Image: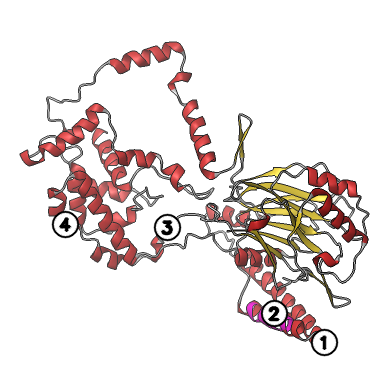
Amino acid sequence: MATFISWNCRGFMSKSSELKDIINKHHPACIAVQETYLKTDKHYIRNYKIYSKHHNHDRASGGVAILAATHIPSIPLTLNTNLQAVAIRIQIQSLVTVCSLYLPPSQHISQTDLNNLICQLPSPFIILGDLNGHSPLWGSTDSNSRGLQIEQLLADHNVCLLNSDEKTHFHLPTRIFHSVDLAICSPSPLPFLNMTVDNDLYNSDHFPLIVTDNRHNPNNSYRPPKYVLNAANWQKFTGLANINSETIKSATIDEALSYIVNTIIEAADCSIPKTSGKRRKQSKPWWNADCQHAYKKQKKAWDIFRRRPTTENFINFKKTRAESRRIQRRSRRTSWRKFVSSITSTISSRQLWTKVKKAAGVSSNNAISVLIHNGRTISSLKGIADSIASTLAHTSSSQNYPPQILNNKINAEKQKLNFNSRTNFSYNSCFTFLEFQSCLASVHDSSPGPDSITYSMIKHLTPESQNALLWLLRQKTQHNQPTNQNALLHFYNRIWQEQYFPSMAAGYNNSFIETRQGPKESIKLSSNCFDLLSLQVARKND
């Protein structure tokens, strides 16, 4: 499922903590916010890209924005309108247009402007926003001119209203609930959409609207689970990861490789925890037990007021809310002072600049953008990966070489290379355990290959298991084999001489398309086991 949220936040900067709470609770694909009160674009929410439009005014007021999840392809949509509106196209089942709209209650809005906005939104589309219209059609007890405009808009363009009669706004001075926040969509996605209203104001006076697309969303998975090596029980892992050398010697290399991988991974599954695979929560480093306790009291007071809306309960709610805000401000100040005091002359320059960037809110933008290639819009993750791979393949193709270089290349490749060696050079000798240990000591943990085996796992194998692994690696380069290993040697020599790669190698090449789940996901096309082999071969040739 994919979730869209609309919320009049009444100040983006002052409600950034509440925005993080909404994201952690609902994990939305995008959030349409109104009355952002922003004047610049230099704002940041982790894992979301912000598209905004500011209200041209002497002071910060009004304004709209859309926060789009960076792991889902999206692209901004240019709107030619004077309305406070911003729109993007985001990949759900297909490209869906999402528009955040704010219509101030005191501003005259012409029907022509509303009609022009609708005409600029490619279908299917969803309009989310605070429209300040009253009508019995969406639960109001009366109608106003804005409500009649919206009713006319729905009828003229055959668009659908997702609201029922749930209240979306709480007017504090009068203590009256209204329905002014609306969700409107084109007809095609209507059967799959469901709208509810969150029961928490999140320190605004508007409740968030939660629009859910009930279809399966292939972009929901964010990243594959990874082993948390810092929390590993290495003693348990070493005891479980017993690789039998006799099994290695008696099996084919493919079978032996499968046996080694399965043994290590089974031991890792029992001794090393994994990440959940979900997106990281929005962090609030200043949030502590006092903040949590005060917030619970505020929510309890609000629930009591909703059940029994008396003056006494309303005053109690306002008191607990003010107290919660005071405690949060104090906690923010304390946390900031502690953070600044950690920047001392003893920390490294890398740590220094990391802290400076955090303090300044500087972050790299890793959002996946929709591609437009040869006039065709490409929005699916697989389509984007295929398009990039195709472009890179064409760029590096030998067809781009100058004719003279290409002819020399063709002639050179016609010559058969002789890999037979008449002399027992040192680089043809077997790998020794000392060479293996030396290479293993020089490597550092990096992204594992498709088999998920890390260097740390190999380092924590017993010497007997490492020797068994080394025995397998020797079979790749050993020239003087015993008779019962000639068939195995012949198989690998055919791979080398005939330049035919087994299916496993092809699977590694496709892993970019099959496993790419997020903008920051590092994909490695080879196994750490064979990287060690390459390193040993390279050292022999030095």
Residue 2, x across and y down, in percent: 60, 57
Chain-order first, disc 4 or disc 1: 4
Mark identifier at residue 310: 1
Q: In the image, what residue occupies the spot 79% across and 50% down? A: 85
Q: In the image, what residue occupies the spot 28% across and 68% down? A: 236
Cα separation between marks 4 and 1: 75 Å
Q: In the image, what residue occupies the spot 56% across and 59% down? A: 345
Judged left or right of residue 420, residue 113 is right
Mark identifier at residue 499: none
Residue 300 covered by magenta stretch:
yes
Q: Amino acid at mark 4?
A: Asn
Badge count:
4
Closer to the camera in the image, 333 or 294: 294
Cα separation between marks 3 and 2: 36 Å
The answer to which image quadrant residue 334 occupies is bottom right
Residue 19, x across and y down, in percent: 68, 64
Closer to the camera in the image, 517 or 452: 517
The answer to which image quadrant residue 312 occupies is bottom right
Give the number of the mark in front: 2 or 1: 1
Which SS type dominates the magenta stretch? helix
Identify the residue position indicated by label 2 in the image.
Answer: 299
Chain-order first, disc 3 or disc 4: 3
SS for dot 1: loop
